[in-house]
Amino acid sequence: MGTQESRSRLVTKLERIADKHPDFLYGRCVTFAIALRKLTGLPLYGLLGIDEDTGKEVLIHAYVKDGEERVDVKGPRSLDEIISDFLDDPAIIDAYEVPLTEGRAAKLATGSSKCPTLTSAAPIAAKIWKIVQALHLTR
């Protein structure tokens, strides 16, 4: 099996996981990002913007940063790829990326009582990270 086939299979695996867990992309990304940070030790980052109604800073999306790539439930991505997932969010217009502490990320997050716990996010984070590492080997 060639490198391109392996890479294609890995990307397909990432897509399937993301499709099964859309809550870790939209709405519950902080929980996933913290689980991934705890697993990898990579720094936690967020894409922030300003809410047009309140004028307050809001979290659009949270992820970890691995060099120049950002990693979320969809795997390794560029900042532009992440932004493209949130074009319907009015706060994206003036969005900016910042490093986050877990406390600040949690404070900015607006999850519900149904927010998945780190215990439920950790196994998904481990699957994603295993695929990310395999993708790095196919370069």
Image: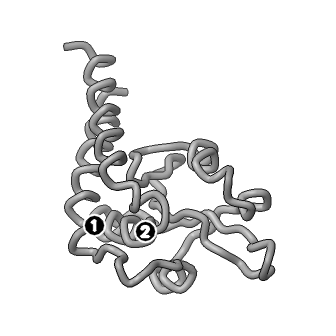
The quarter of the displayed image where residue 90 is located: bottom right
User: Could you tell me which residue is drawn at 40 percent across and 61 percent down?
Assistant: 23
Q: Is residue 93 above or below residue 28?
A: above
State the scheme by which the image is colored: one colour
Which one is earlier in the sequence, the residue at label 2 or at label 1?
Answer: 2
- Residue contact at pointers 2 and 1, CB within 8 angstroms: yes
Q: Is residue 108 above or below residue 122?
A: below
Q: CA distance from mark 2 to mark 1?
A: 10 Å
Provide residue 138's location: percent of width, then percent of height: 31, 27
Question: Which residue position is annotated with label 1?
Answer: 121
Under mark 1, the amino acid is: Ala
User: Could you tell me which residue is drawn at 51 percent across and 65 percent down?
Assistant: 62
Q: Is residue 10 above or below residue 26?
A: above
Q: Nearer the viewer, residue 80 or 54?
A: 54
Provide residue 125's location: percent of width, then percent of height: 28, 58
Question: Which residue position is annotated with label 2?
Answer: 28
Few, some or many C-alpha atoms within 10 Å of disc 2 (few <14, some 14-19, many ≥20)? many
Few, some or many C-alpha atoms within 10 Å of disc 1 (few <14, some 14-19, many ≥20)? many
User: Could you tell me which residue is drawn at 68 percent across and 50 percent down?
Assistant: 87
Residue 87 vs residue 109: left or right?
A: right
Q: Identify the mark at residue 62; answer none if there is no mark.
A: none
Query: Considering the image in quadrants, where does the C terminus appear?
Result: top left
As helix, strand or loop, the secondary structure at mark 2 comes to loop
Query: Considering the image in quadrants, where does the N terminus appear?
Result: top left
Q: Nearer the viewer, residue 49 or 26?
A: 26
Provide residue 107's location: percent of width, then percent of height: 53, 86
User: Could you tell me which residue is drawn at 55 percent across and 63 percent down?
Assistant: 61
